[in-house]
C-alpha cells in the first residue's frame, strides 16, 4: 500500500477595505489543519502611486507587495498556493510553486477563462472555476494531479472564510502582525 506524500497548501487572500489592502495567508496540511498564519498590515496607496502604477497598481499591491512578502516570511512551505483574489495570480511569476485562483461563481473574468487551457477545473459545488496563470499553462496538469489526491479531503474555498474570521479576531485583539 503506497502512502501519498503529505502536501501543504497555502491559502492567500487580499481584502480591499477603506483603510487599504490587507492580506492574510494560511498554510495548512492536506487535511486542512493550520500550520502557520500570517497577516499583513494595511497598505494604502497614495495618489502618486495611483498615477505611476496606473492599471498595474492592484497587481503590484496584491502579488508583489503583500503576497510575496507573506509567502517569503512564512516558514511552512506550500506545494500549492490557492487564492480567491485574481490579482494574486501574478504571484506565480515570483514563486516556484503553482498558484491557482478559485474564482467566485459569479466572477465574469473567471467565467470567461473557464474553457481555456488555463482552467484546471470548471465551476462546481458553489464555486467558480480553478485557474492557473496564463503564462504557466503547464501548471494545469501538476495542479490536477495534486487535487486528485485531495479529492473529498479539502474544500478549496473554506479556508478563506477562516482567514477572514481570523483577520476580524486579530483586529478585535489589537494584534498588529508584521508582514
Image (tube, helix red, strand yellow):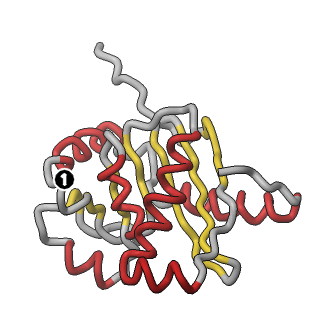
Residue depicted at x 37% and y 43%? 80
Residue depicted at x 19% and y 62%? 134
Classify mark 1: residues with Cα within 10 Å, few (<14), some (14-19) or many (20+): some
User: How many numbered marks appear?
Assistant: 1
The residue indicated by pointer 1 is: 136
Residue depicted at x 71% and y 61%? 167
Q: Residue 169: percent from the left, percent from the top?
A: 80, 60
Which residue occupies the foreground of this view, 108 or 56? 56
Which quadrant holds residue 103? bottom left
In the image: residue 11, left or right of residue 15 = left
Which residue occupies the foreground of this view, 48 or 174? 48
Residue positioned most to the top:
1
**Dot 1 lies on which element?**
loop
Q: Residue 148: percent from the left, percent from the top?
A: 27, 42
Residue depicted at x 49% and y 55%? 67
Name the quadrant of the N terminus: top left
Which quadrant holds residue 45? bottom right
Which quadrant holds residue 74? top right
Q: Residue 84: percent from the left, percent from the top?
A: 44, 65
Q: Residue 108: percent from the left, percent from the top?
A: 30, 85
In the image: residue 139, left or right of residue 103 = left
Amino acid at each position: 500500500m503506497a502512502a501519498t506524500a503529505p502536501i501543504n497548501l497555502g491559502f492567500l487572500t487580499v481584502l480591499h477595505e477603506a483603510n487599504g489592502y490587507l492580506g492574510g495567508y494560511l498554510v495548512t496540511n492536506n487535511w486542512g489543519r493550520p500550520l502557520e498564519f500570517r497577516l499583513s498590515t494595511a497598505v494604502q496607496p497614495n495618489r502618486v502611486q495611483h498615477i505611476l502604477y496606473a492599471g498595474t497598481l492592484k497587481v503590484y499591491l496584491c502579488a508583489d507587495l503583500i503576497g510575496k512578502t507573506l509567502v517569503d516570511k512564512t516558514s511552512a512551505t506550500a506545494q500549492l498556493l490557492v487564492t480567491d483574489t485574481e490579482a494574486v495570480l501574478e504571484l506565480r511569476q515570483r514563486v516556484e510553486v503553482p498558484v491557482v485562483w478559485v474564482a467566485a461563481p459569479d466572477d465574469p473574468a473567471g467565467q470567461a477563462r473557464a474553457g481555456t487551457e488555463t482552467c484546471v477545473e470548471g465551476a462546481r459545488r458553489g464555486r467558480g472555476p480553478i485557474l492557473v496563470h496564463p503564462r504557466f499553462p503547464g501548471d494545469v496538469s501538476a495542479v490536477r494531479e495534486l487535487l486528485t489526491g485531495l479529492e473529498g479531503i479539502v474544500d478549496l474555498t473554506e479556508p478563506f472564510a477562516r482567514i477572514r474570521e481570523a483577520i476580524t479576531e486579530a483586529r478585535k485583539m489589537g494584534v498588529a502582525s508584521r508582514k
